[in-house]
């Protein structure tokens, strides 16, 4: 490790500014190394390649050599300074006031945010409630109905469109309130004429239309519409009906069950659907318990989050989201994601501190065991660091639950909790 002298010159919140001094001998040696590289590769008039003097190379490539020296020394000196000061840094350091010249000590200042020193409390004796879901026929019936609907057949008809039909339309944009819908024509748009499946304006407008008929339909899109061009917009479409197909649902019986796969009967299908619902409900209950753990402990430890970390995180989120949606403003993104970033930082730090205080660790063999289960042909495999982080978080969670007061409460199954 590089020999440096480091001194903290300012402390503010989680921020620390320190001055780093690199001995002149280290500086000169680095200058010499890079000068020699340029001398060997450079071509000078009257000299064979590699035969020019170091003085000539230093003069011609002064700017490039100085930049190479900076890029070589500063990262090494920074790491050495952190070790000397016993600082655990987070986020990216900010460099300032660099003094660099041959024959003299190199001096520079760096501002960095450190890992907060917070005494984590309130993670033992939590009062938690685990939901226990009893799966009944009332839960199985909607799942069977969904399978039935997925097995529907469609027959094209010549009558006017009715509720429950599937229609195909061509849409021509006539008016766009915000003037931001890029396409003027949308062909072969498929609409499911059932409440909740199609926009209410299309549902009302298309019902009763016959193939070949055209009609103007104005659609007011909500603020949470997925398409940013349509979000909160009002668009008037000229709508032509191209086809109407009638839906036919299969009879739910043993034959229906057998056609779905390896089920021997309708009773067998219902039993396996119920088992799947129980599995998913149990998984949802575990996730909810984890949510309670996280929420209670984060609320019990409301320490400030380093501003530099928060700014860096939000800059990354803003850049990614604005690439996908140019209408999003940095302020709106910051308002939405700041609370999430703050909670995540606190939780990550809490996990780290509980592990340290309680002596909880992940062994190398545990990581290898997880890696061994990953398929060899997997396109993306989790890194060792990610596996270690996940295992540690799971261990902390188990430790907290083991030291908590957990009561069980029977709950009626809400299908919404089963969504991923």
Image (cartoon, helix red, strand yellow):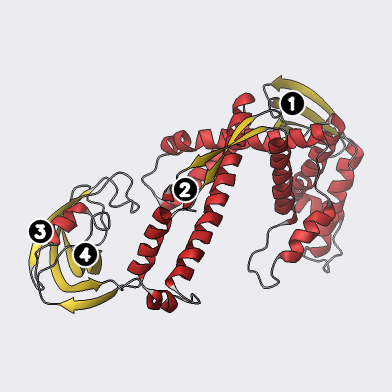
Q: Where is residue 126 in the image (x, y as percent from the top left)?
A: 65, 29
Viewer-side label of 2, 3:
2
Residue 117, labelled with which disc? Answer: 1
Q: Disc 2 marks which residue? A: 417
Q: Sequence-wise, which precedes: disc 2 or disc 4?
A: 4
Q: Position of residue 53 (x, y in %)?
A: 86, 57
Q: Sequence-wise, which precedes: disc 3 or disc 4?
A: 4
Label pair 2/4, CB-CB below 8 angstroms: no
Query: Which residue is pictured at 20% across the width and 67% down the height?
Result: 165
Provide the secondary structure element on which disc 4 rests.
Answer: loop
Residue 164, labelled with which disc? Answer: 4
Left-right relation of 74 to 258:
right
Structural distance between the alpha carbons of marks 2 and 1 = 37 Å
Viewer-closest of 10 and 221: 221
Examine the rendered structure and indicate whether residue 48 appears above or below residue 84. Answer: below
Examine the rendered structure and indicate whether residue 357 appears above or below residue 281. Answer: above
Question: Dot 1: within a 10 Å radius of its alpha carbon, few (fewer than 14), some, or many (20 or more) residues?
Answer: few
Structural distance between the alpha carbons of marks 1 and 4 = 62 Å
Circle count: 4
């Amino acid at each position: 490790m590089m020999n440096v002298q480091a001194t903290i010159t300012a402390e503010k919140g989680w921020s620390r500014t320190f001055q780093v001094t690199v001995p002149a001998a280290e500086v000169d040696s680095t200058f010499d190394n890079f000068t020699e590289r340029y001398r060997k590769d450079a071509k000078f008039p009257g000299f064979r390649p590699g035969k020019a003097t170091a003085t000539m190379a230093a003069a011609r490539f002064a700017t490039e050599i100085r930049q190479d020296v900076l890029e070589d020394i500063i990262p090494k000196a920074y790491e050495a300074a952190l070790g000397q000061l016993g600082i655990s840094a987070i986020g990216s350091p900010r460099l300032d006031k660099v003094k660099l010249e041959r024959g003299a000590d190199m001096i520079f200042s760096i501002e960095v945010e450190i890992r907060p020193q917070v005494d984590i409390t309130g993670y033992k004796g939590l009062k938690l409630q685990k939901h226990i879901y009893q799966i009944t026929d009332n839960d199985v019936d909607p799942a069977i109905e969904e399978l039935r609907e997925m097995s529907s057949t469609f027959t094209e008809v010549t009558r006017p469109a009715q509720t429950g039909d599937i229609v195909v339309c061509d849409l021509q944009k006539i008016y766009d309130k915000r003037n931001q819908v890029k396409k003027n024509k949308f062909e072969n748009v498929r609409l499911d004429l059932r409440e909740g499946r199609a926009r209410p304006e299309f549902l009302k407008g298309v019902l009763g239309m016959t193939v070949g008929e055209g009609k103007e339909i104005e659609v007011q899109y909500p603020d949470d519409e997925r398409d940013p061009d349509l979000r909160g917009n009002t668009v008037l479409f000229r709508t032509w009906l191209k086809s109407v197909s009638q839906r036919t649902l299969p009879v739910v019986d043993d034959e229906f069950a057998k056609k779905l796969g390896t089920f021997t009967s309708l009773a067998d299908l219902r039993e396996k659907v119920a088992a799947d619902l129980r599995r998913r409900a149990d998984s949802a209950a575990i996730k909810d318990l984890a949510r309670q753990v996280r929420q209670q402990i984060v609320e019990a430890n409301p320490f400030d989050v380093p501003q530099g970390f928060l700014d860096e995180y939000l800059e990354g989120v803003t850049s990614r989201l604005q690439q996908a949606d140019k209408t999003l403003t940095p302020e709106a993104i910051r308002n939405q994601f700041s609370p999430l970033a703050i909670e995540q930082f606190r939780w990550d730090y809490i996990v780290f501190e509980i592990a340290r205080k309680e002596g909880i660790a992940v062994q190398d063999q545990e990581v290898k065991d997880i890696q061994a289960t990953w398929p060899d042909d997997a396109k993306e495999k989790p890194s060792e660091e990610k596996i270690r982080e996940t295992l540690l978080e799971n261990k902390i969670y188990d430790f907290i639950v083991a030291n908590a007061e957990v009561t069980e409460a029977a709950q009626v199954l809400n299908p919404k909790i089963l969504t991923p």
